[in-house]
Image (tube, rainbow, N blue to C red):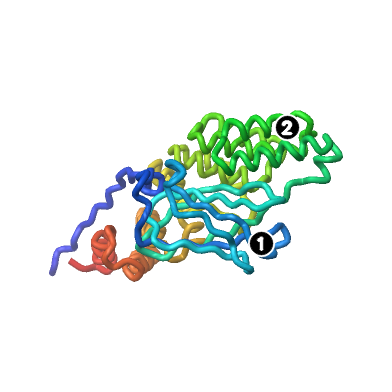
């Protein structure tokens, strides 16, 4: 009789996915990557002529030239290097929309959809008159030019005359001015001020969540990620990092919930199946674990985790 093979599952600490937050080189932003997106107004209609600017966050020439959206609100860039990118969208009559996303130059990247928020002209004029509107427009213009300190000063002048319920949008402008200066402490503090007024302010929730994940503060980020409404999600690595943190702390059910979320929203992400497979393996849900490892091999047969997944499958299938 053949002796049964023993297999020990080692639960080791998994390193966080830091690749998405590695800074791009200032003059090395070209590559093979492609990203596209759509700009919509609050009613979901396309916005034509919105200015879209991509950069690595390392100076004015750290990305391709800006472009305008077409009649369908569409934009697309080719020839980008992999890594963490910043996107800024500007349109007259709307607040500047700015965020970040990870770009993989060797596989398809999910499209970016942005709903612009109009400058609340009527509310502002009733609360503080035309001067406040002028300060907001000046702040937007200066921020678009990269004059962050001057933009912040204009936003703060407008903020003084606004009722608290009308302040979150202006606070977002101030937060973005700090963000462009890599001042995480003040960015975070300003976003929290906006969320104190409007706890469901999606732009603030997204930027704060991304900021905290990027700083390795996954559990803090999860508080704000969980407040995002249905259909509003961050990039996959944000949820993966939260799940990994749970896994390393042996909180398997919580880790599984995060990896399930990634699989649901990013079904072609092989890392989601790898980490979920590990959790299921540790929970002795072997059939489900094997299914995830097979899916990983289907999506990325030559990837860095393919050999390990194949070994797990060999064990689960009872092979030598």
222 or 5, which lies in front? 222
Q: Is residue 107 above or below residue 128?
A: below
Spot occupied by residue 199 in the image (x, y as percentages of width and height): 68, 41
Spot occupied by residue 34 in the image (x, y as percentages of width and height): 43, 63
Residue 7 showing in the rendered view? yes
Residue denoted by label 1: 47
- Other residues around mark 2 within 10 Å, as few (<14) / some (14–19) / many (≥20): many
Cα distance in 3D space between marks 2 and 1: 28 Å
Quadrant of the frame with the N terminus: bottom left
Spot occupied by residue 208 in the image (x, y as percentages of width and height): 56, 40
Q: In this view, does 169 lie to the left or right of 144?
A: right
Q: Is residue 207 left or right of residue 104?
A: right
Residue drawn at x 53%, y 37% is 179
Disc marking residue 159: 2
225 or 281, which lies in front? 225
**Which numbered disc flags the more N-terminal residue, 2 or 1?**
1
Spot occupied by residue 158 in the image (x, y as percentages of width and height): 73, 33
165 or 297, which lies in front? 165
Q: In this view, does 278 lie to the left or right of 142?
A: left
Residue drawn at x 40%, y 41% is 249
In this figure, what is the number of numbered marks? 2
Q: Is mark 2 on a helix, strand or loop?
A: helix
Residue drawn at x 69%, y 59% is 41
Q: Is residue 95 left or right of residue 12?
A: right
Disc marking residue 189: none
């Amino acid at each position: 009789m053949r002796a049964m093979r023993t297999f020990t599952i080692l639960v080791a600490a998994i390193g966080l996915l830091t690749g998405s937050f590695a800074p791009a080189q200032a003059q090395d932003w070209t590559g093979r990557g492609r990203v596209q997106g759509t700009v919509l107004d609050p009613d979901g209609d396309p916005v034509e002529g919105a200015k879209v600017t991509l950069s690595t966050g390392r100076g004015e020439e750290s990305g391709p030239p800006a472009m305008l959206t077409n009649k369908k609100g569409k934009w697309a860039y080719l020839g980008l290097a992999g890594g963490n990118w910043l996107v800024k969208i500007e349109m007259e009559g709307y607040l500047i929309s700015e965020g970040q996303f990870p770009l993989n130059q060797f596989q398809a990247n999910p499209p970016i959809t942005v709903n612009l928020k109009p400058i609340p002209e009527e509310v502002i004029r009733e609360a503080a008159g035309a001067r406040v509107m002028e300060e907001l427009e000046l702040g937007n213009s200066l921020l678009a030019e990269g004059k962050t300190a001057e933009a912040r000063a204009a936003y703060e002048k407008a903020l003084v005359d606004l009722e608290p319920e009308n302040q979150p949008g202006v606070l977002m402008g101030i937060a973005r001015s700090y963000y462009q200066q890599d001042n995480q402490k003040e960015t975070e503090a300003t976003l929290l001020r906006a969320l104190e007024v409007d706890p469901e302010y999606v732009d603030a929730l997204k930027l704060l969540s991304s900021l905290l994940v990027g700083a390795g503060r996954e559990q803090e980020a999860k508080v704000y990620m969980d407040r995002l409404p249905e259909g509003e999600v961050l990039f996959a690595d944000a949820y993966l990092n939260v799940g990994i943190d749970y896994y390393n702390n042996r909180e398997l059910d919580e880790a599984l919930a995060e990896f399930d979320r990634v699989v649901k929203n990013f079904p072609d992400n092989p890392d989601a199946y790898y980490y979920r497979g590990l959790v299921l393996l540790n929970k002795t849900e072997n059939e489900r674990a094997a299914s995830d490892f097979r899916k990983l091999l289907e999506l990325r047969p030559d990837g860095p985790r393919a050999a390990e997944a194949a070994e797990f499958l060999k064990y689960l299938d009872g092979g030598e």
